[in-house]
Image (cartoon, coloured by chain):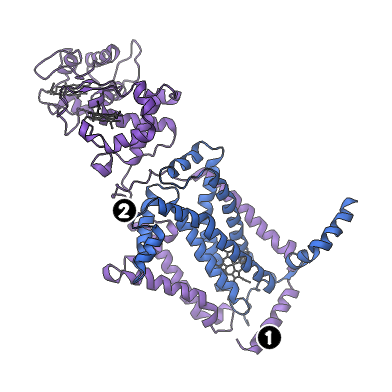
Chain colours: A purple, B blue
Amino acid sequence: MNDIQKAQYNEKYKRAKRNGEKFFPDTLYKDLLIAIALFLLLVGLAAFIGVAAEPRADPSDTTYIPRPEWYFLFLFEMLKFFPGSIEWVGTTIIPGAAVIALLLLPFYDKNPNRHWKRRKFALTFMSVVVAAMVFLTIRAVITTPPQKDVGAVATTLPAKIAAGLDFYSVQCNECHGAEGEGGVIKGVKGLEGFKMKPINSQDEMYTRSDDTLYNIIEYGQPSLGMPPFGKAFGGELSRSDIGNLVTYLRYTWDNRVELPKEAAQTNAIPTLGPTDIPSYDVNIAPIVKRYCVSCHRPGKENNNYVMGSYADVMNSGDHKPNVVPGDLNSNLIRMIHREKIDAGGEMPPTKALSPDLVAIFERWVKAGAPEKPKK
Amino acid sequence: MISKRVFPWLDERLGLTTIYKTTLDRMVPKVNWWFTLGSATLFLFVMQLVTGIMLSVYYVPSPDKAYDSIEYIMTGVAFGWLIRGIHHWGATLMVITVFIHMLRVFFYAAYKYPREITWTTGVFLLLATLGMGFTGYLLPWNQKAYWATTVGTSIAGSVPGIGDFILRALRGGSDLSAVTLARFFSAHIWMLPAVIIALIGVHLYLVIRLGISSVPKEND
Ligand code: HEM
């Protein structure tokens, strides 16, 4: 802009101000209205959408699909057009050029006009850029594969304890027993006859901090026979999983902390009224999960009797059927009564099921071993 | 009675009337609602400051404790979920408003004489705002945070020549670690806010000094 143009502009601007309004309150009240609206919007978003819970960071879990914050997605997507050795064009040249172009805009845009009709090139150019950004963002959203479902993230204490119990039942039961009571191990490869100390004792809980328990589970104690469970060491548990497991151990076995009522309720095995008919879904599945699945799942020593579903419980194993509806001489019933039969020894091998759990199994088989509860 | 004596006394020393005259009691051109986006951004920034300061009371910037401290904010602190929710959504909204604010300045040619420096400080504000988003994303130390930052910093590492230096400067080593978290935390709560506050100061000084531009007419 030359001096004449500047003078012209200043003259026009003075006129616009003279015909204008008072900043306070005429202009400011609009800003105030917008601020109030934004505040309400924020509270609404926080209250009704909130912040999605995510699992704990886990450097060993490389299956996680990285996803930047949405307003960086367009950059991320643009990089896909610059693969391999020309990646630096997408990461350096284009963003760098864009920033410099923005910074210096007022200095190289010599067009003195301000109305859009006289700035068609600039406006078209910017519109194309913005459209490209929107396009890339949408494309990124559509093309990124969905995250592998990690299930709901437990955020409340009862939910964590419940999740921890599930992990305990599946992963730890076979060696440490359903209540961490230990005893002489039977039916576990490599540890047959090992006398396992109880890990639910006061001695154990008072002298092992949460961090210690965490490390024992993640890293294991391989030379003593305890395998590692952390993904980083070849196990199946993520950091969040191990955290929940430790929470479960602490709240169930440490007599200095109290198990929340709600957690005790969700963890309890459903009880039966005198006339109720037990079903697999409601009554048997929780017992099986807690006391049997740890050994009776693929990859373990169990005569190929996997107990993950109703069909498998009814119809798998080297001596199948192990459950015959109506027949109290079924293998399963005899074995939980601690008889030694062709199919194998006492089940669970180390510690007998409590009489009321055995009774639930019996009533279930007698009633025809139904899968779904009767209405 | 008292105010009649106190106000002139204060005014004589603080110049309150002058401040009032130069900032509030001035004529500006009649403008439309698009011109509220700057102050909307300012409002959101102040909200981020307030909620961010509250979060910093409970947040612990260490890989061992960050996740748990966030969880505690969400479940253990009274209205912690609200504060975090506002901070979370405020960040998103602020990026939106700052971007549209820039577009409105562009489409009305408000970056031209005499507002060139207002624009330049604005571009730095945009970059700093994005920097806040990038550094804040890591702080919850969850899966999303960890992996997005791993990828984000490695992108910075692909700059020819100095990439490796940038990568190490960001991460404080070759991998994401406690040092990375400490750096991002410090950038997020000290360095970038300081930069933003200083830039907003200059930005607003210029907006008041030069006056808000008028909506261009056909012959402008
Ligand atoms: C934290 C970020 C920012 C804040 C808090 C902010 C705040 C403001 C405020 C309150 C105004 C008064 C007019 C209006 O509200 O439209 C303004 C004007 C202006 N802003 Fe920003 N701004 C920010 C970012 C930016 C960016 C990213 C740019 C451009 C790259 C920019 C360029 C300008 C210009 C040129 C003006 C003068 C506009 C005119 O006089 O019409 N600002 N800003």
Residue A144: horizontal and vertical position, in percent? 33, 56
Residue at left offset 34%, top offset 66%: B158
Residue A200: horizontal and vertical position, in percent? 33, 23
Can you say which quadrant of the picture contains the N terminus of chain A? bottom right
Residue A50: horizontal and vertical position, in percent? 49, 45
Marks 2, 1 in one chain: yes
- Residue type highlighted by circle 1: Ala
Residue at left offset 63%, top offset 55%: A35
SS at circle 1: helix
Mark before the other along the chain sequence, 2 or 1: 1
Label 1 marks which chain's residue?
A
> Which residue was labeled with disc 1?
A7
| Residue furthest out toward the left | A342
SS at circle 2: loop
In this view of the protein, which residue sits in the foreground, B191 or A251? B191
Q: Nearer the viewer, mark 2 or mark 1?
A: 1
- Residue type highlighted by circle 2: Pro
Can you say which quadrant of the picture contains the C terminus of chain A? top left
Residue at left offset 65%, top offset 88%: A3
Residue A364: horizontal and vertical position, in percent? 25, 16
Q: Decide if residue A48 is on the left or right side of residue A184.
A: right
Image: A14 above or below A80 = below
Which mark is drawn over residue A145? 2
Image: A93 above or below A193 = below
In this view of the protein, which residue sits in the foreground, A8 or B130? B130
Task: Write down the quadrant of residue B199 in the picture.
Answer: bottom right
Task: Write down the quadrant of residue A307 in the picture.
Answer: top left
Label 2 marks which chain's residue?
A
In this view of the protein, which residue sits in the foreground, A211 or A123? A211
Image: B79 above or below A128 = above
